[in-house]
Image: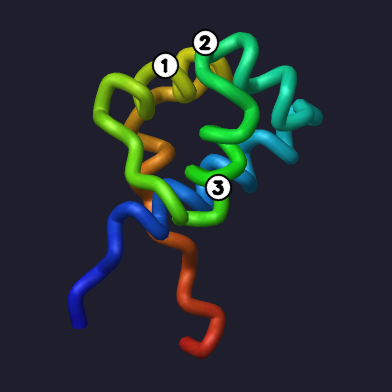
């Protein structure tokens, strides 16, 4: 089964933003992107460039690699 890396990034962006206690507006402003673009990224309606992912990781103060970690499969025992 092929993994959708954009869906992984979308999910991680939302998860990490919420864990950091940031609003869409706050993270977008810090990363230098629009709030609407960030909302599209988090809902996997737009695909970010690697440069944008790097800006978001820096704004979240996490290594970029953490945005590419797939979620654990909860159906496994």
Residue 66's place in the image compared with 35, above or below, is below
**Residue at x-position 38% and y-position 50%:** 69
- The local crowd at label 1, few if under 14, some if 14 to 19, many if 20 or more residues have their Cα within 10 Å, is some
- Report, in whole angstroms, how far the alpha carbon at label 1 lies from the one at label 2: 8 Å
CB atoms at circles 1 and 2 under 8 Å apart?
yes
- The local crowd at label 2, few if under 14, some if 14 to 19, many if 20 or more residues have their Cα within 10 Å, is few
**Residue 50: percent from left, percent from top:** 25, 28
Residue 53's place in the image compared with 76, above or below, is above
**Residue 55: mark:** 1
* Badge 1 element: helix
Residue 60's place in the image compared with 1, above or below, is above
Q: Which residue is mark 3?
A: 42
Q: Nearer the viewer, residue 52 or 8?
A: 52
- The local crowd at label 3, few if under 14, some if 14 to 19, many if 20 or more residues have their Cα within 10 Å, is many
The coloring applied to the image is rainbow
Q: Earlier in the sequence, mark 2 or mark 3?
A: 2
**Residue 35: percent from left, percent from top:** 64, 27
**Residue 26: percent from left, percent from top:** 73, 18
**Residue at x-position 78% and y-position 29%:** 23
Q: Which residue is mark 2?
A: 32
* Badge 3 element: helix
Q: Nearer the viewer, residue 70 or 42?
A: 42
- Report, in whole angstroms, how far the alpha carbon at label 2 lies from the one at label 3: 16 Å
**Residue 57: percent from left, percent from top:** 46, 23
């Amino acid at each position: 089964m092929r993994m959708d890396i954009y869906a992984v990034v979308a999910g991680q962006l939302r998860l990490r933003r919420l864990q950091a206690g940031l609003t869409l507006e706050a993270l977008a402003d810090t990363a230098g992107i629009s709030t609407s673009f960030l909302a599209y990224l988090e809902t996997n309606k737009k695909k970010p460039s690697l440069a944008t992912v790097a800006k978001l990781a820096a704004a979240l103060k996490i290594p970029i690699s953490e945005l590419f970690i797939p979620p654990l499969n909860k159906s496994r025992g």
